[in-house]
Amino acid sequence: MLRALSTVGGFTMMSRILGLVREIFMAAFLGTGIVTDAFYAALRLPNMFRRIFGEGAFNSAFVPLFGRDLAEGNIETAHRFARNAFSWLGGILLIATVILIPGMPWFAKVLVPLAGPETFELVVAYARIMFSYLLCMALSAHLSGVLNSMRIFAMPAFAPVLLNVLMLLVLGVVVPMAHLQGNLEEIGRLVSWSVCTAGFAQLALLWVTCWRKGVRLYPVKPTMSPRIRRLGRLMGPGVLAAGIQQINLVIGTAIASSQESAIGSLNYADRLFQMPNGMIGAAFGVVLLPEITRLLRTQDELGANDAVGKGVLFSMLLTLPAAVAFVCTPQAFVGPIYERLEFTSEDTLHVSRTLAAFAVGLPAYVLVKVLQAGYFARENTKSPMFIAGATVAVNVIASLVLFRFYGFVGIAIATSIAGWVNVLLLVIGLRGKMGLGPKRRGQLVRTFFAAAAMGAVVWFADLGMESWFDGAQWQRIVAMLLLVGVGFSAYALLALALKATSITELKAGFRR
């Protein structure tokens, strides 16, 4: 498991690091003003529909069905099913794209109802440019599902790097060469075009990879075969669950749009939050689903349960220290990374508070990816749908209440609360199928104590390097890197000393 996780996690880390560099450029050129708010609100529209109809709901239903054909040796049947599904997905999303681009002002009113007229016009303009990204990324997610089912993880994990590379080319090369510094609206427009271009680049890369691996995917006349009907039945709850979650994001954005710079501040904090969440959570979600599906197809129920248990343990080993560091010393990360040019010290304070609030829920959102795999591999998409509905209700109510007292930081607090409610409900539904015996439960407790002790270490280290964090830019970056090194070393030693894990256990994980 750990070998596959390291492959996916490694490329995801590359993508997240480049994404963070991209955000540094965005913060420097755009700050947290109306153009930033408009760009990220516009990007949320195609991402919303992609997550509803693409990678989440579609692959959660597709991978177990496709994986079953592969496990039974029905290779040609699997390939025909993949082509048919590819054609249905592409056709539906192409129609949606043609309809939604002219109707963008209406959707923008739903997303940012409280935004000013200037912000609203920019949201519409940027969203129209980026909306074809929806079609490309949903099809790319399908191709990734095909490759992951064949235990090919590297290229699907690498593909998202292209988005950050192209955005960085615009921000780091095109903008300076064209002397566009200060022309914020035009910078936003160029970055929007880079997002659109990246969607086509990722789709082309994954299509070629599938072709080279022997999977000939191309548009065919869609047919309503029994497998497609089964896919639709499994997708239905997943689409509803993803739709409920995206409605939650829309409500959060709508609430935040009433406070200037809120959307940008939430995004900058979310980018740091997504470094560990995306790298660890996405890796576990990608690797665990086909692995548990394969074990269940061979009637190895105990092995499938054990895979979930390992996922819970290893995800917490990797996630808890990051969460604790972000809670204890958020400014030590936000200041060195973002604070320059248009991004002020006041912005640093706001984003730091938001990051700490998000970080409380970081372990929960990684656990959700692990636990959901236990449902989806058993072709159970209804339970996560109902759980998502309950979670969103909690999130919306908490956001509305907490926003009154804490502003947009309250939205981040509500997100964390909802994440832990999601975990609790998923655990209740998976009772007896999680592979968490007394030994693993003890390891989880010791992991928590190791992370808490590391938090004390980095907090005191942060105090000791206060003059460096108040110094020049290079001093702040060096101080941040030293803090990360101190925290990592302390946590590794504490985890081994407390027997939260062992070298032998880690080696065994890489061999499997």
Image (cartoon, grey):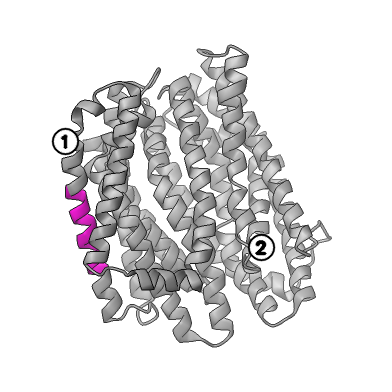
The secondary structure type at the circle numbered 1 is: helix
Q: Position of residue 114 (x, y in %)?
A: 41, 29
Callout 1: few (<14), some (14-19), or many (20+) C-alpha neighbours within 10 Å?
few
Sequence-first tag of 1 and 2 = 2
Place residue 420 in its image quadrant. Answer: bottom left
The residue that disc 2 covers is 147
Whether residue 206 is in magenta: the answer is no
Please report the residue visible at 27 percent of the width from the left and 42 percent of the height from the top: 356
Place residue 187 in its image quadrant. Answer: top right
Which amino acid, by three-letter code, is at mark 1?
Leu
Please report the residue visible at 48 percent of the width from the left and 44 percent of the height from the top: 16
Place residue 492 in its image quadrant. Answer: bottom left
The stretch of residues the image draws in magenta is: 444-456
Please report the residue visible at 36 percent of the width from the left and 58 percent of the height from the top: 318
The residue that disc 1 covers is 463
In this view, the residue farthest toward the right is 221
- Up/down of 221 relative to 339, above or below: below
Mark number displayed over residue 328: none
- Up/down of 142 relative to 137, above or below: below
The secondary structure type at the circle numbered 2 is: helix
